[in-house]
Amino acid sequence: MNEMIAGILFLILSIVVYLETLKMPPFEYGAIGDAAFPQGIAILMALLSVILIVSKLVGLSKTKEKRKPIDFKKLFEEYRLVAVALISFIVYICLIKWLGFVLPTFVYVVSIAWFLSPKLKKNIPVIIIVALVLSIGMQQFFQSILGVSFPTGRLF
């Protein structure tokens, strides 16, 4: 049943991603625009989600087991890290609009590294250094070498 819920959620996410790519401006120099890659990923994700849902529905129809009620507490305990990562990513995306790229990326990398690392191996100095190098390094690489500017944000 958990796989069916994940399939439905990913199907919804793929639809949202595809609809958001329709807002991207068209590419002026060729047939394939900026939205082509994210649209392809969204279509692939939707296809795989439908396959997962159908396979679970076929499996449910073949088994005659008594259906158990969903234990949301157990479900949350199993998928706690996934929920934290997803919520952190959504907050990260929202913060980029207000604070630019560097600061939210630093906070996001530190928080994800903290939550996903084992309890006994949380090395804070290494996490901070990696987050600083990653956030500043990515911005410098894209701006200096590739000539792509990152969001500056409304506050900074």
Image (tube, grey):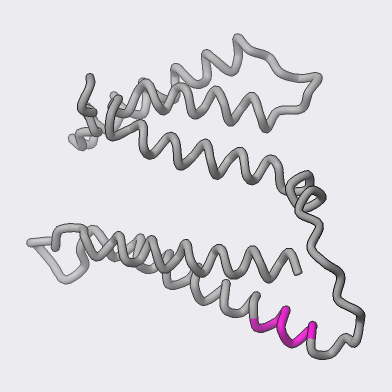
Residue 59 sits in quarter: bottom right
Total marks drawn?
0
Q: Residue furthest top?
A: 125
Front residue (pair 127, 111)? 111
Residue 39 sits in quarter: bottom left
Q: Quadrant of the C terminus?
A: top left
Q: Residue at x 90, y 87 (%)?
A: 64
Q: Quadrant of the N terminus?
A: bottom right
Front residue (pair 26, 19)? 19
20 magenta-colored: no
Front residue (pair 110, 153)? 153
Q: Residue furthest right?
A: 65
Q: Tell me residue 98's x, y (percent).
A: 28, 29
Magenta part of the protein: which range?
Answer: 54-60
Relative to 79, does residue 46 appear above or below in the rendering?
below
Q: Residue furthest front?
A: 69
**Prevalent SS, magenta region:** helix
